[in-house]
Image (tube, rainbow, N blue to C red):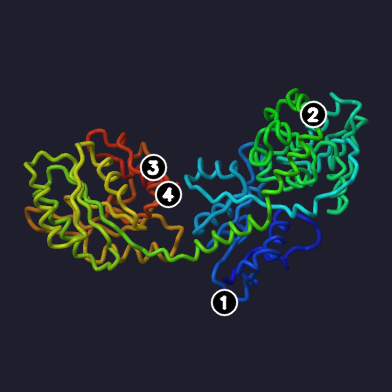
Amino acid sequence: MKVAMLPHLSHFRSGQSGIKRVIEAWFKYMPSMGVEFNEPNTGGWDLRVAHAGVTDGECDVAILHGMYWTGSYQGQQWEWHSNRRIVNSIRQAKEITVPSSWVAETFQRDMRLSPHVIGHGIDWEDWQHDKESQNFVLWNKNRAFDVCDPLPVTELAKRFENIKFITTFARATPPNNVSVIGLQTHDDMKELIQTAGIYLSSTKETFGIGTLEAMASGIPVLGFNHGGNKDLVQHGVNGYLAEPGNFDDLADGLVYCMKNWRVLGANGRELARAWTWEESCAKTVAVFEKALQPDPPTVSIIVPSFNYADKVGRAIESAINQTYRQLVEIICVDDGSDDQRRTRDLVKEYTIRDGRVRYQRQDNQGVAAARNFGIGQLDTKYVLCLDSDDWIEPRFIESCITELEKDHTIGIAYTALKWHDHETGKSELSTWPGAYQSGKQFDHQARQNQIPTACVFRRDAWERVGGYRSRYCPDGAGSEDAALWAQILS
């Protein structure tokens, strides 16, 4: 497969970065797995891949390395902009990867999606050595701001005056047993890692390639029990994980690591064997292949009904008459009607006429539960919930899905409405809904829903937000649809 990737390896200048290391490994191992990397502006590629949101949205696979955790510190404007680009790439991407369980938890909690967790790797053989340990504690982050705070170096150095600490950066004037060396070349840093006594991994990393390098070098890891450490370091096996922010616990960990240095280091070296670039690349290529799989724009219609046997037939009829060719199912969910099976018998007549029509019954729980019950049986890409006293024009679904397929960032599509007077037979175009206004949609107290119940939405969006909520329709119907739209659009 031909992959257009940003950034491309040719875009990097001299120097090192975490993303550059990943891309170097991809260029080294993925060609043998059938991947050809193209410059993005050359054309002819099969797949667009973007690291860290650099394309500001346009991609098929979003390779995320974390975000700037602006909720934990006062982020700068460029960090907020970077987060926005990452969110835009998520909205566009067919598949998403992250490097650790901790990063995945953030997206699962805040964005209601489960990305592929694919850790980075290491060329294990390159880190084997017979150098003698110099018994110092090493902290080697490439900066001393935002999440990379060298304070743990100072706190430990104060408690252990007879131990030498080497750090790339330090706060203010460090204790006398701390050597501040600044940024180093890759080869010089490799020498420091391999001759360290303890590797201090205090930063909340999105993965921790430096931690993995220390493990492969046979160096025990001392850190806090957070971030990527939780995937790499087994407490008491190849290092010590202290309670985050607890420097006394971290100090106890330093004593433990020194006391058990040889066993912890040997265990870490063996554990690092599992983190190969070949395995990481193979998992990533599998994600590429998944993104290339066709995703047909299938749709199903859910028609909830409660004691509407005299009306639901018109709704089903309008569903059957849709011009859209990939309409898979029309499920009428009978919400416990007490109409002597009239609803059931009517729907079964339609089933004989059109095999796409199905009848399902549940105990009376309200319209939200009825819709959820029906949608839960689907595997189509799109869903339309059609109330039993409404009906749709033949090209309704076709018109909506055409727009949804044009832009992956659109989650809901709808059209104008007509009102109909049953007594006079008069129909006119309704003034509602007008142009969508997000401010009104998210103002629940104002009760100014902007989106009709009859709309086409992505099934995975319904799944991510947990479906319709019955508490918004305690009397059987209410604002349950408005609440769902607000959740999907947020």
Q: Nearer the viewer, residue 126 or 339?
A: 126
Which mark is nearer the camera, 4 or 3?
3
Q: Position of residue 299 (x, y in %)?
A: 31, 59
Disc 2 marks a residue whose amino acid type is Leu
Q: Nearer the viewer, residue 464 or 488?
A: 464
Query: What residue appears at the point 87 percent right and 38 percent down from the top-left corner?
Result: 166
Tell me how far mark 4 sits from mark 1, CA to CA. 34 Å
Residue where numbered disc 3 is placed: 466
Disc 3 marks a residue whose amino acid type is Gly
Disc 4 marks a residue whose amino acid type is Leu
Residue where numbered disc 1 is placed: 44
Query: What residue appears at the point 72 percent right and 61 percent down from the top-left corner?
Result: 24
Tell me how far mark 1 sits from mark 3, CA to CA. 39 Å
Q: Earlier in the sequence, mark 4 or mark 1?
A: 1
Which mark is nearer the camera, 4 or 1?
1
Q: Please state the total of marks drawn on the protein image.
A: 4
Q: Quadrant of residue 125?
A: bottom right
Q: Quadrant of residue 380?
A: bottom left
